[in-house]
Image (spheres, rainbow, N blue to C red):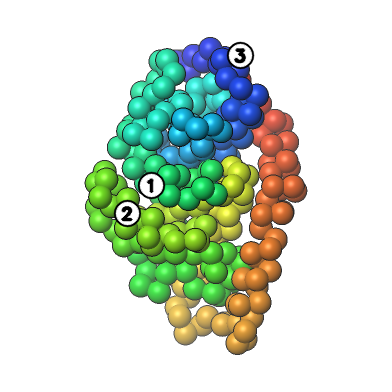
Amino acid sequence: MATQMKPQSVQEQVSDAEWALRVDLAAAYRLVAMHGWDDLIFTHLSVRVPGPEHHFLINPYNLMFEEITASSLVKIDVDGHPVMETPYLTNAAGFTIHSAIHMAREDAHAVIHLHTPHGQAVAAQAEGLMPITQTAMLIRDELAYHHYEGVATDLEERERLVADLGTKSAMILRNHGTLTVGETVAEAFIKMYFLERACEAQCLALAGGTALLNHPPQGTPEKAANQGRAGLKLVGNMLAWPALLRKLDRADASFRD
């Protein structure tokens, strides 16, 4: 049986700050795979590397998400080209969405983009995400929408994508998938968790038909949105993320290599 060769560690070649980001981003890739949100080798999670060079970390294009480690992540420039020697393939075109958001939003240090069945299903529904579950209400106020323009390889689409996102931290890409941004990998991941769970619950609820839906009382979605705005960042960074890292360590700590 063929096995994935362990990548040579790059920890001694990068700053402590970059290494910490590499570990967090590798963990996020493993967690995406663990939750069944991956799409073979497609879609991306990225994070900005501290410094004036506008460098970013992203997945090798030829690895499954459960294979990704801190050392195998590729450091690229704003055009998606490697800036460190790497044995791995890169997908410059796949960085189109990420580069647009990273460069336009100073607070968008981490960007996560997925193609899950539930996310795509809600992206294909005219009403988008409905405030019919607590999870949806907590994230919905942070949600923007962007109309589908084909596979995201057109650099001219970046301006429209950024304009549609505005100051929001989550997005449904119509007929395409989901996206979240955060000041940390943890924040982006927790927001994606809420968005994906909300999409999954909506698909299950709609299976019974819209006539059977129970809509919350007037004013409740707005109240929940305010609660989510204040709580998701705190809970994500300080509570949920450390717990998720412990879960990964128990399952397979090789993401730290």
Residue at far bottom of view: 218
Amino acid type at circle 1 is Ala
Q: Nearer the viewer, residue 20 or 45?
A: 20
Q: In which quarter of the image is residue 224?
A: bottom right
| In the image, residue 67 above or below residue 178 | above
| In the image, residue 237 above or below residue 89 | below
| Residue ID for mark 1 | 100
Q: Can residue 26 be seen in this view?
A: no
Image coordinates for residue 109, horizontal then vertical, percent: 54, 43
**Contact flag, marks 1 and 2 (Cβ < 8 Å):** yes
Q: Which of marks 3 and 2 is nearer the N terminus?
A: 3
**Which mark is in front, 3 or 2?**
2
Q: SS for tag 1? A: helix
| Residue ID for mark 3 | 12
**Residue at (51, 82) in percent of width and height:** 212
Amino acid type at circle 2 is Glu
